[in-house]
Amino acid sequence: MDVTAKDTADICLFFDHLFDSVNGNFHKVVDGKVYRTAVTKNSPHHQLWRNAIKVMETMHFVDSVTKQKCKPQPPTIKNWILTLKGFQNVVKVMDTNGVHSLLLRNFNQDSLENMFGALRALGYRNNNPNCQMFASSYRTLVLNNFPSSHSPGITDAQLEQQINTYIAGYICKKLNTVFLKDCSKCLKEICTSTPTGQHDLVKNRDYQLNGKLNLKFPNTTFCQLVQNTINIIYKYLPSICHHSSLKCELVQIINKTITILTSLTDIPRNIYEILLDTSETDVKMALNLAFDI
């Protein structure tokens, strides 16, 4: 065999070990891949990285035509050296903080790319957000993935209250957009100017463009109204869902059942009718939004 073939084998094996060392996903050797294991204090990765850094510091790219050193040099080798030195520091820091075994496959760029992809999708492919827009989008993404039926540190009752308040706020905003038209007297009857803990989800979902809150913060009375409406829909919908006049029947049932509307004295009576007439559709839409959080 030609001696140059051995050189090719050596460089292939070198990079095979190098790729394995930063792609470990097993705690023990599998298929003879010694370096595709977790990095620990006494693992062979450290010696490999020290040797690899020295070797790559002597490497350079050669022009295929002139056979001379390329100018400028591609950043590949330089970035590999930075990556290895970075992992050396990461391992030291993690070991100091009590993490003595690292699977480096978890250190990849896919998660970062996915996050920026989600940010672009949320902002309708806005590739140049300012700091405020980025922070708002990031906060929304975190909240989108945070609530679940088993979220740590939050009870089901707290989560349900936050979702109910968010639904009520959605209906407040739609009522204002379509009917109230920023009537301060009307909004005072269904919204509060002093948000409390039950409005945490609404506050965190709000985009404060130019320092102005854009979502509505429903008061306790309106939240109770919306919750009662939802309860009625859940109670009666299964038995009448096949009826052709479903919406009209639901509105009639809500009209007969809900009495809390009488406490909202400063809103014209026709607003009650509008709310009841649109409540089934609005609650359905708001529930879809809430279950997507």
Image (cartoon, rainbow, N blue to C red):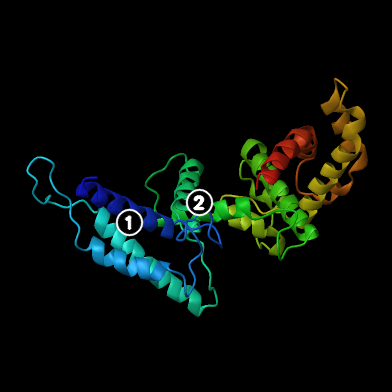
Q: Amino acid at mark 1?
A: Phe
Q: How far apart in space, not on screen, are marks 2 and 1 (Cα)?
A: 43 Å
Q: Amino acid at mark 2?
A: Ser
Q: Is residue 204 in view?
A: yes
Near-viewer residue (165 or 25): 25
Q: Is residue 210 in view?
A: no
In the shown orientation, is residue 84 left or right of residue 166?
A: left
Coordinates of residue 233 in the picture (x, y in percent) = 85, 38
In the shown orientation, is residue 183 left or right of residue 277?
A: left
Coordinates of residue 247 in the picture (x, y in percent) = 82, 28
Near-viewer residue (6 or 293): 6
State the residue at coordinates (76%, 60%).
158
Secondary structure of the residue carrying numbered label 1: helix
Near-viewer residue (3 or 71): 3
Please tell me the numbered disc located at residue 14.
Answer: 1
Q: Earlier in the sequence, mark 2 or mark 1?
A: 1
State the residue at coordinates (70%, 43%).
171
- Foreground mark, 2 or 1, reads 1
Coordinates of residue 275 in the picture (x, y in percent) = 76, 38
Q: Quadrant of residue 162?
A: bottom right
Coordinates of residue 239 in the picture (x, y in percent) = 93, 30
Please tell me the numbered disc located at residue 137.
Answer: 2
Secondary structure of the residue carrying numbered label 2: helix
- Dot 2 and dot 1 residues touching (CB under 8 Å): no
